[in-house]
Amino acid sequence: MPKKFYDIIPPSSKKSIPSKKPFLAEQPSVEEVKGKKKKKRKPRKSRKVFFKSLIFSLLGLIVVVVLGFLFFSGIEIEIWPKTESLEFNCQVSLKNDLGGELGDWVESRTIPGQSFDVKKTKEKEFSSTGKKVKEAEAAGTIRVYNAHSTYSQSLLSSTRFVSSDGKLFKSLKKEVISGGKYEGGKFVSGYTDIEVKAAEPGEGYNIGPSTFSIPGFAGTAKYTTFYGKSFTDMTGGFKGEVAQVTQGDLDRAREDLVNKLKEENFQFLKDTLPEDYTLLFDTLSHEVLNTNSSKEAENEGESFNYQVELKSQGLSFNKKEMRSFVKEVIRSRISEKMEIQEESLNTDFSVESLDLEKGEVVLELDIRAKIFFKIDLEKVKKSISGQTLNEVKLFLGNLPGIEKIEVKSWLFWRRRFPDDIKEIELKLII
């Protein structure tokens, strides 16, 4: 019979082995026993962590699926229809106060025009460019005394007077010098103030106050009893070149102001024009209503002021009406199966002819646009609802006028397109 080994001898055994300290020291402690027990439980903890991770993963997958149904349940398909480029020219007339409707305009190739006008006045100082030689005689006033008798004395026009420094002046008209008189037994000379001017031009005759003799009385008693005195300066004597306004100066001033007013009036019309209107620069007409100059031609002066009043008038059209007209013209040239891509529509224009008196303008239109096959998106949605992806691709591929299709969003768990067409989004890519 094999032997049994015991760490401790059972109490029932009669033979006892005396206990020794070394033997007792080899026995495991309580902590070691507990440690062994813990090591044995480790596999249970690993299995618990695994199951927890699995549960969390399943929950995450469920959340993703639920969110997918809530937020990504719709289907999006992009459709590229076949396109064509269209480019052609046509003419259209603008007429003031044109009535009728769009159909009438297309048939008659006319659209309404609208006139706008403005009046502005502009004034500016200009320099004179003309030159001329100027000669002027000094002039002034002399008081002529009569100390000869109580009788008056007539003097002819151009009677000569010589100043104390020998400058010769002449009277401007016939004069009568008053006679003297007696006051308290004493004789008092009579006198008359007369206008005179120098016999020659030049600044040398601009003299100050002086006394004058009358050469015509030389050799007679009157030579000493008739004389003159000036109490102010003689002025105005000149001989030289001065600035002068020419007709060319006036013409240039007018042209300058008219051109500036044309620009200002045009800018004003553009800035104040209603937003939906386009002003045609070539239709602008201008009328000079008034001009005024501070100096006439050949007047002296270093400068002069010139003023112009200008009326400007131009014809415009409504941009929305023009666009509607162009779209109708395009539709009249293409098949009913085709549609215009609005964003690609572009129209340039130039003035072909104009009659401002009648208020008529003919415009040459350069029209460019893209057209594409019409696709009834709502009808397509109804046709593909509830179908499989392959059925949808086959259906769309067989539709006329489609160049390319692309399904942008498709959930892997969906076998068919939604029955609710609101969950289907179709986008046209031009």
Image (spheres, rainbow, N blue to C red):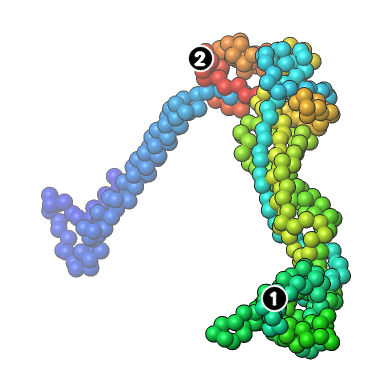
Nearest the eye: 393 or 137: 137
Give neighbour class at mark 2: few <14, some 14-19, many 20+ (Cα, 10 Å): few
Quadrant housing the C terminus: top right
Q: Identify the residue at image location x=32%, y=51%.
A: 39
Which residue position is annotated with label 2? 420
Residue 49 to residue 195: above or below: above
Give neighbour class at mark 1: few <14, some 14-19, many 20+ (Cα, 10 Å): some
* Viewer can see residue 111: yes
Q: Identify the residue at image location x=82%, y=52%.
A: 251
Q: Amino acid at mark 1?
A: Tyr
Residue 355 to residue 205: above or below: above
Q: Quadrant of residue 340?
A: top right
For label 2, the SS is loop
Nearest the eye: 31 or 139: 139
Which residue position is annotated with label 1? 151
Q: CA distance from mark 2 to mark 1?
A: 134 Å
Left or right: residue 135 compared with residue 231: right
Q: Amino acid at mark 2?
A: Asp
Q: Identify the residue at image location x=82%, y=22%.
A: 90
Question: Residue 326's spot in the image, x, y percent?
Answer: 73, 22
For label 1, the SS is loop
What numbered label is drawn on residue 209?
Answer: none
Q: Nearer the viewer, mark 2 or mark 1?
A: 1
Q: Earlier in the sequence, mark 2 or mark 1?
A: 1
Residue 25 to residue 122: above or below: below
Question: Residue 91's spot in the image, x, y percent?
Answer: 81, 23
Quadrant housing the N terminus: top left
